[in-house]
Amino acid sequence: MGNTDSATLNNRWVTTATAKLGDAWDRVLLYGKGGGAWVGTNNSNVSVTTPAGTTATSLSGSSTNSGWTAGIGVEWAFYGNWSARAEYDFIGLQNKSYTVATNAPAFAGDSINVNNRNIQLVTAGLNYKFGPWW
């Protein structure tokens, strides 16, 4: 009782597998997308601090977290084979729970829950299509 648990998670990479569905007008495409997402976390530092302010234990490691993704975007074919795009993606990750190791006997077995681990991304790109537009 009276312990402060904290966690720091550094996302190192993001991978998504999505499907897009959209509608095109002339040279503009509006689309929505959805699918799965995976995020690699490194240096996940979890510590338990006593009321006196001393750190009782620290854990670290790497893991891969899975979740879902949904987004919207627009792509504009503005000149010849050139197009530009802008996209917003939301990645919802699963909550994570840590258990304090036995090297901190006073706190061994305490759980640390990390909730609301969502990521929001805004990306833009410039594309060149080789070959004719079909």
Image (cartoon, rainbow, N blue to C red):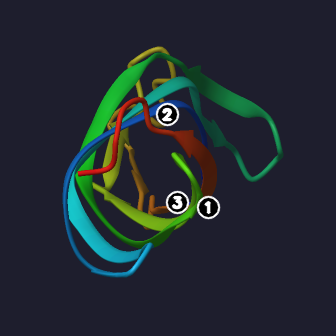
Check disc 1 and report the residue beneath it.
Answer: 2
Seen in the picture, residue 73 relative to 81 is either above or below; the reply is: below
Distance Cα–Cα, label 3 vs label 2: 10 Å
Distance Cα–Cα, label 2 vs label 1: 12 Å
Residue ID at (61%, 61%): 2
Q: Quadrant of residue 25?
A: bottom left
Q: Residues within 10 Å of mark 3 (few under 14, many from 20)?
A: few
Q: Nearer the viewer, residue 88 or 119?
A: 88
Residue 106 - label = 2
Residue 46 shows in this picture: yes
Residue ID at (23%, 51%): 134
Check disc 3 and report the residue beneath it.
Answer: 1
Q: In the rendered structure, which amino acid carries the disc numbered 1?
A: Gly
Residue ID at (60%, 56%): 123
Looking at marks 2 and 1 on the same chain, the residue that comes earlier in the sequence is marked by: 1
Q: How crowded is mark 2: few (under 14 residues within 10 Å), some or many (20 or more)?
A: few
Asked if the residue under mark 1 is in contact with the one under mark 3, i.e. CB atoms within 8 Å, the reply is: yes
